[in-house]
Amino acid sequence: MSRAITLARIPEGVPQPGDFALVDATLPPVANDQLACVTRFISLDPYLRGVLSGRHLGHTLSIGEIVPGSCVAQVSASSSTEFAEGDWVVAESGWREAFVVPTNSVRKIALDLAPPSTALGVLGMPGLTAWAGITQLANVRAGETVLISAALGPVGSSAGQIAKLLGARVIGIAGGPEKCRKVEQHFGFDLCLDYKASDFAEHLASACPNGVDVYFDNVGGYVLECALSKLALKARVVLCGLIDQYNQSQRPPGPNLGPVIGARATLMGLVVYDFYPQFPEFLAQVGAWVKARKLTWLEDIAYGIEATPGAFCKLMSGNNFGKMLVAL
Amino acid sequence: MSRAITLARIPEGVPQPGDFALVDATLPPVANDQLACVTRFISLDPYLRGVLSGRHLGHTLSIGEIVPGSCVAQVSASSSTEFAEGDWVVAESGWREAFVVPTNSVRKIALDLAPPSTALGVLGMPGLTAWAGITQLANVRAGETVLISAALGPVGSSAGQIAKLLGARVIGIAGGPEKCRKVEQHFGFDLCLDYKASDFAEHLASACPNGVDVYFDNVGGYVLECALSKLALKARVVLCGLIDQYNQSQRPPGPNLGPVIGARATLMGLVVYDFYPQFPEFLAQVGAWVKARKLTWLEDIAYGIEATPGAFCKLMSGNNFGKMLVAL
């Protein structure tokens, strides 16, 4: 017998303790290729909020089910030669005191690096997230300005430190002066800005006089809006989380970046001026197609200089039919 | 003497003909390395709306100034051996009947491909935009599903045809059934959807059962929102225009993609699950930093299985201080 926490009702807004229930759970016997484990640390992560509302990448949870999540545990009984009693492991075992799982579903923890609880943070999923965003997606280079939201959290704090170790200038964003101080003093960020301060946007502007080369976004919403307005040329933005809207039942207006994250999509700003050096290459390919009439065009033509303002108004009303031109 | 169109007042909302004025303009004499030209076609392009409001990449325009823009013109007098009377050129000469410009500011038009007016469309800036987005940024491959908004316009219609020529399945989006028919029949798109139809979102979903691999966005707003919800895994989105908001004095709520375009930025969705195969690589690099205590962590620990719901609620209120854990 051991205890576990189940979902009692789907939370609305910020979750309440009453959304959950403490229950007794029986443990099955340990079969071949299974381990019995005792939980030592339960990981609490913001993505769980989406799971509770059925909004996280297809995960759903029914009322009465044990809340899922990662744990650090110690093996209490093993039918495998790979694991001995007392071994430390990470398991996706949820909110419970003890559990029995297949041996191939757990990962053994390297104890020589740091205490085992870090397998749920800096050396686990949040650390991997930070590393992937900084080194695999944004490819941060020495000398760049890197901006990171939720900077005191396990993803943000690791991302910032990794960027620092790679030679970047790192600015954090957190909520309130106490968190900001901790980000600077404990994690060594060059600076941390309080997004709750009324002059946050001004502080951000003066902290990034040459713009932001890489923004690692964990929050979405207002902070993302401010950061997008400070991007340097060829900036990269890692869209990693939308904590700002996890508690909201209605998503905020405007383009929804949730599906962009889910699709691992890439959004790229296009300004045609950048491609004028490639005009000959364009003309060679598209010009040949046009000459062969494999590629065609459509023109909506007004006549006379006097007709120009009216033609422009027609274009901006969406009433034109093809490329809008004035012939003189 | 020739005539030109100037800005009479800054437009509010959809531009009105009264926002402009027809004026007489004197032409200077033709100096060395200059050309006198007679305008044959004036190009009208949506980006001009931003210029009129001082919102386009730093371009601004004062009241009384001649409205800028591209033109196709014929040389009427030349002091250069490179250009003869009658030659066709593209110039950034604005809304006027005639002009004098430096020879190095114009581009001669290749007349063997198509009529000279196409130098302002399919073989000019809009065509280059389409080609750059499809071939240089999105890198469209045969068999992919490509979605294109403002599909009857010169950018969208070229982008769709180029994608078709590269072997993609191409779906257009346009306003109203007449435009949609034209996109399908004149430009050969596989399908064109009317975003003004009440069931547009459903039509889009059924037209892209496997999702959208590449979305070429010229409009922003509602159409972008719908498209983002239909992205396939590893989708690429070319952010090229925001016609939907060009006439608005207040930009719509939510993340503003205007500065993303201006910065030529890349936004990348990160889902950590994709990187678990690289866990050993992560642990080698970050684990070494952690072991050397060059990289640190911070834990906010609650105690006992009963404390788990409260600790999760604390996390989701943003009141935690570092990685949230429950120790058992």
Image: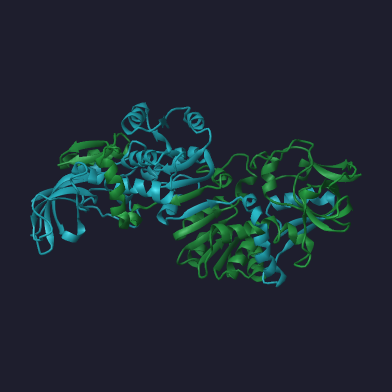
Chain colours: A green, B cyan
Left or right relative to A104: residue B281? left
Q: Looking at the image, which residue sits at the far right? A: A1
Q: Residue at image x 23%, y 38%?
A: A310
Which quarter of the rendered picture does the N terminus of chain A lie within? top right
| The one of A29 and A205 positioned closer to us in this rendering | A29
Q: Can see residue B35?
A: yes
Which quadrant of the view contains residue B155? top left
Q: Is residue B246 left or right of residue B99?
A: right
Taking B279 as reference, is B219 above or below it?
above
A33 in relation to A307, above or below: below
**Which residue is pictured at 60% across the width and 70% down the height?**
A165
Q: Position of residue B277 (x, y in %)?
A: 65, 54
Residue B16 in sight in this render: no
**Rendering coords of residue B201 (x, y %):** 49, 31
Q: Between residue B6 and residue B223, name the one nearer to us.
A: B223
* B53 with respect to B5 (left or right): right
Horizontally, residue B52 falls left or right of residue B147, namely left
Q: Quick one: quadrant of the C terminus of chain A?
A: top left
Residue in front for this viewpoint, B84 or A9:
B84
Q: Percent position (x, y) of residue B261?
A: 42, 52
Counting every numbered tag in the picture gives 0
Residue B46 lies, in percent from the top left, at 32, 44
